[in-house]
Image (cartoon, grey):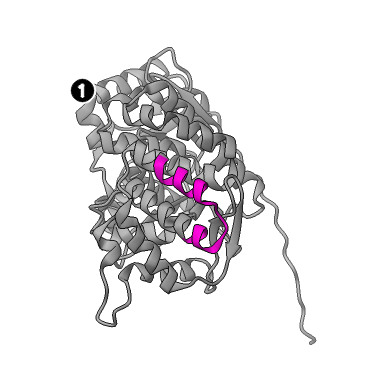
Amino acid sequence: MSDRFYKQVLTVEFEYPVVFTRNVFDPGNTSLAGVMLPTSSGRCARAVVFVDSGVASCHPGLSDRIQAYFAAHATEVELAEAPREVPGGEAIKGELGFVRDVIGFFVDLELCRHSYVVALGGGAVLDAVGFAASLFHRGLRLVRLPTTVLAQNDVGVGVKNAMNLSGGKNTVGTFSPPWAVINDFAFLPTLTDEHWINGAAEAFKVAIIRDAAFFEFLLRHAGQFKARAQEPMEQLIIRCAELHLEHIRTSGDPFEFGRARPLDFGHWSAHRLEAMSGYRISHGQAVATGIALDSCYALRQGWLSEPEYRNICRGLKECGFALWRPELAEAGADGRLKILGGLESFRQHLGGQLHLTFPRGIGRRMEVSEVDEALIAECAESLKGC
């Protein structure tokens, strides 16, 4: 018998709402209950809620408000168990035991594939809970309730999740679009100063490579972001989230089968910095340094002008970011800067060939497949003066 060959072509459309609101657990707010559809048999949907313990400590009575909300919407959705607190912070992403525990919790509650998992917290909790939810029954319906600026304008609106294993950042994960994303601005005022400003780095990132007008907005309001002005920060979150959503929707590669990942501008070194510091350096702080480093490289290559580079650094510093990190100067036994190990990690993430995004002026980008490591080292050294 001769060989037979079939080419299977599938087209799958994904759709999920991203809502910006306040006081999501006010019984009169239907943002959450409205996305929880009945099961295919017409029965009331079941849901479980995971709450970042850091958020719970800043919002006394949150668990009671959540339970009261579900009680008020009992004809639409059933809360299968009282909200479950989980530890927040990057450390949770390194614990596969946590994922096993969450899946065991799903088993004990006999959740079906049409059940809802509500993850409320920072990006690490969204990642870890989302990873577990994507594995059970090959995917429960994940509703994200991001509570930090970084989670609301970047991590929470995307289509992937990840865990940090074997000493690397985001080494294990899945592509799994959420069922819905609900950004509640009422959670922001209790953030620490660091968590308040962290998300501004991602806003600068996407503005530099996609939106010159947004970049000018960030420059004008940088001092207000640092001063914790709520209204401009909400505008930052909305526009940054829009740009991320637009890229995911229009890039033609939402699940990153290709080689380029423009939204990771500044991230090859940022991820390495986080890991080198044992995640003492937060993601937003590391991204700010990564943006400055890659922008300096773009300046030296003639892709950015001197005023453009200075504006990038000025805006980041006025937000409160430190651009120099001692880890940038750490070298291995061979004399090579350890930060350059981030290039190898990115090469693996990108399918074996390096493709990095750099700005070509403000609001535009370019891709390169080779970098001058000596020039990167010079740029890292130059950040000492920033």
Relative image position of residue 325 (x, y in whole percent): 27, 56
Q: Which residue is rendered at x = 43% and y = 29% of the image?
A: 221
The image quadrant of residue 230 is: top left
Q: Is residue 118 visible?
A: no
Task: Return the residue found at the far right.
Answer: 2
**Quadrant housing residue 97:** bottom left
User: Observer-nearest residue: 159 or 247?
Assistant: 247
> Residue 229 or 293: which is nearer the viewer?
293
Identify whether 66 is placed above or below 211. above
- Which region is colored magenta? 297-314
Determine crowd level at label 1: few under 14, some 14-19, many 20+ residues with C-alpha closer than 10 A: few
Residue plotted at (74% across, 68% down)? 7
* Residue 20 magenta-highlighted: no
Counting labels gives: 1
- Residue 98 in view (yes/no): yes
- Determine which residue is flagged by label 1: 60
Q: Nearer the viewer, residue 196 or 62?
A: 196
Task: Please tell me whether the stretch drawn in magenta is mainly helix, strand or loop.
Answer: helix
Element assignment for label 1: loop
Q: Residue at x 19, y 30 (%)?
A: 57
Taking the magenta stretch, the answer to whether it contains residue 305 is yes
Name above or below for residue 6 compared with residue 125: below
